[in-house]
Image: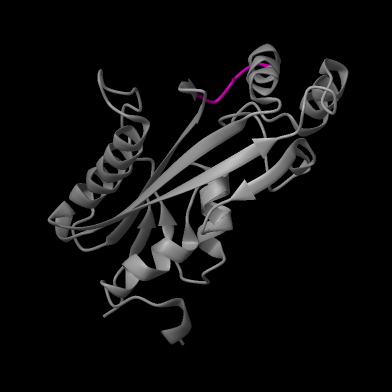
Amino acid sequence: MHTPLILASTSPYRKELLARLQLPFDVHAPQVDEAPHAGESFLQTAVRLAREKAVAVAQSHPNAIVIGADQVASCEAQRLDKPGTAERALAQLQLQRGKTSEFITAVCVAAKAGQMLKEACVATRVRFRSAAELPDDRLRRYIALENPLDCAGAAKSEGLGIALIESIEGPDPTALVGLPLIALTNLLKSFELSALSQG
């Protein structure tokens, strides 16, 4: 009998990434408060939220395998949330010029109403081009063209944002977009689910 697969996320980026595995899946909003807890590290926040999202949906779909994910971006110990406005996007990009930001992406797979959990976390380091290469007018043009207001750090590496970046270091290029597919495929093996064994 086919076990339903659910992505516990409303992110169009995560939906697009999961679709690459060519596994049939549904999407459900996890209804989880994403505010960080006092005293949490960036890694702890990402792991906790990925788990809470997966478990929240798994509890209402006990026969499904549920994928939850979360990403926390930071630069110089400052958390970078989704900017929401062009002004905040500009401020985030100004902060990151000539510096290295870290994107911590956690993924959790839950089954049996959240009683079975498998988790992984992937860190990606992104070095941004210098202020001389990225003057304010160039950043404003990028923001106008890309509209990265729903992207933590405001640099969409899968789009025009790649022009802002000097280098990317990490084991999984999909982690930076929001869902680490290499880690996820390893986790899904524990649930006897593989993209290459279908059909």
Predominant SS of the magenta segment? loop
Residue beneath the point at 42% across and 86% down: 197
Quarter holding residue 94: top right
Residue lying at the far left in this picture: please name it. Answer: 115
Is 138 placed above or below 23 here?
Answer: above
Residue beneath the point at 56% across and 33% down: 101
What scheme was used to colour the molecule? one colour
In the picture, which quadrant includes the N terminus?
bottom left
Give the left or right position of residue 42, taking residue 94 as reference.
Answer: left
- Judge by depth and name the residue closer to the eye, 36 or 97: 97
Is 170 placed above or below 50 here?
Answer: below
Residue beneath the point at 23% across and 52% down: 58
Q: Is residue 198 visible?
A: no
**Membership of 196 in magenta stretch:** no
- Judge by depth and name the residue closer to the eye, 137 or 113: 137
Residue lying at the far top in this picture: please name it. Answer: 87
Q: Picture coordinates of residue 177 (x, y %)?
A: 57, 47
Is 37 placed above or below 26 here?
Answer: above
Give the left or right position of residue 191, taking residue 185 as reference.
Answer: left
So how many labels did they put on this image?
Answer: 0
Is 179 placed above or below 42 here?
Answer: below
Q: Picture coordinates of residue 31 (x, y %)?
A: 32, 33
Q: Picture coordinates of residue 83 (x, y %)?
A: 59, 21
Quarter holding residue 143: top right
Q: Is residue 15 visible?
A: yes
Q: Picture coordinates of residue 79 (x, y %)?
A: 47, 23
- Judge by depth and name the residue closer to the eye, 17 or 45: 45
Residue beneath the point at 26% across and 22% down: 37
**Membership of 83 in magenta stretch:** yes
What's the magenta region?
Answer: 80-85
Give the left or right position of residue 188, taking residue 179 as reference.
Answer: left
